[in-house]
Image (cartoon, rainbow, N blue to C red):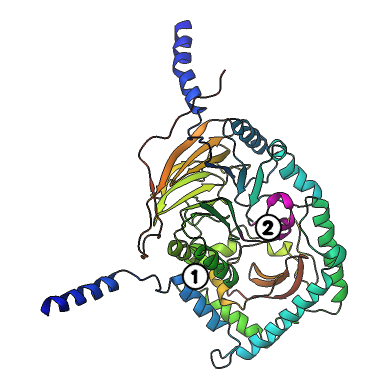
Amino acid sequence: MRVTRWLVIAALASACSAPSATEQTTTEAALVQSEKKTSTDPAVNPDAAALADFKVRVEKYADLHKQLAKGEARPQETADPAKISSTKTALAAKVQAARTDAKQGDMFTPAARPVFRRLVASELKGEDARDTKAVLKDDAPATGAVPFKVNAKYPEKLPLPTVPANVLLSLPPLPAPLEYRIVGPHLLLLDTAADLVVDYLLNVVPT
Amino acid sequence: MRRALVFALVLVLPLAAAAQELRLPNKDGSLKFAVIGDSGEPSSGQTAVAQQMNRWRARFPFKFSLMVGDNLYGSEGARDYQRKFSDPYKALIDGGVQFYAALGNHDDGAQTQYKLFNMNGQKYYTFKPQNGVRFFALDSNYVDQKQLQWLDKELAASGSDWKIAFFHHPLYSSGSTHGSADLQRGLIEPVFMKYGVNVVFTGHEHFYERIKPQKGVAYFIIGSSSKLRHGDLQKSALTLYGNDSDYAFMLVEIDGDELFFQTISDKGVTLDAGSIRRAGDVAPGQNVTTQPVVPQTKPSPVQPGPKK
């Protein structure tokens, strides 16, 4: 009886000493945190209303993009690089024409701005702050080289700045082809298929 | 004087010949491929690397090459694809070599549509060129929820295959310009460990560095295929071998549970060579991947150099 008890205790101890296959990894924990931070459920997130509105706006943009990316503006696999360029040019022209009234703040509305500023700032504190700032500076284009103007083309020759992974996980997910980019202290919302500035938020990175 | 010359030739010629030797098993049925990185700058180094790749392919018939990003520097018009990629690698392309690209920070997402990069319109993707080996191309510029969830799902489905990831930013590096991509590492590495990724090829740093296996994963930086940053490699405790003075590319061969590599300069000189072995499955843990690799102590096989 006593031996059996010890065997059970030993088995339990052994099971506890090594992480089990089902134990949550730090990545899984980060994803759970990310979902909470960017949730559009008011029961989970006090910023839910602003983020839900942002979500509707970016999805509406993605739908428009989908409608326009047809015919000569439809990206498709090709061995002809000239076709890649002409598709992108045609797509950009169609998006620009369809959004002549677009202006700064269409996506980053006054209600959403403080939420984005807070979400970005939260990643620039604590132990990852130094690494985050280093990534923001790594191969980053000069702010003067990028047009902060809705519907403007992102300059073809400039590298696309890498977005710190922790910052990316703290921001609401985007539908394709939208992506965030941070240039200097400013946040850009880019249509990466047409290389167009969809919206921007100035001074989102605290100095 | 004459004696000194003879002595020098006797000493130097065997060394030069040894540097030209193929140090891979070159077995029938093994998986053979090349790796280039930061390769999209038209330069004398790029041309020389491409020529060497073609020359070595005559002895080691690799079927495809990975590209770890910065495939086209600067503008990306039609002429640029030609000048920065399809012209320098023409002999390889004409010879049937397939290229599989990952995106670097200098690359436009439109490259995913370029048929010769085999990305099928995706910024991250997976392919299995041969039974038992699966590759994962990641977009390390933009590690978002969607990509991490995709990686988790694809790795989970990859079973006991060799799992080889390639992307631009090095998770471990001794470079003074960039250094280790700590933020990406914090999110990507736990997924690699959970599913037993074995080998990772990256670039971004314009040098070659073989990193000491980290948590059972072998890391190589090969970002010197068209650009060089002399003196940037500050060899550290991470470094098993490094070179920041020669343009370079890699040849790799997988045979069963062994992977052999040879890193070759633009002058055709072997800079580094060796092999690693998969050690088999281990239980999930905090500090080791579930399918670790171990460096092999036995010397690389040596095939004779080209006939003079």
**C-alpha span from label 2 to label 1:** 23 Å
Q: Position of residue A160 (x, y in %)?
A: 67, 61
Point 52% across, 67% down: residue = B152
Q: Label 1: few (<14), some or many (≥20) within 10 Å?
A: some
Name which of mark 2 and mark 1 comes first in the sequence.
1
Report x, y in % for residue A64.
Answer: 80, 76
Q: Is residue A39 left or right of residue B235?
A: right
Relative to the observer, which residue lies in front, B179 or A142? Answer: B179
Q: Which residue is mark 1?
A: A129
- Protein chain holding label 2: A
* Badge nearest the viewer, 2 or 1: 2
Is label 2 in a helix, a strand or a loop? loop
Left-right relation of B128 to B294: right
Q: Which residues are magenta?
A: B105-125
Q: Secondary structure at mark 1?
A: helix
| Placement of B58 over or under B32, stated as above or below | above
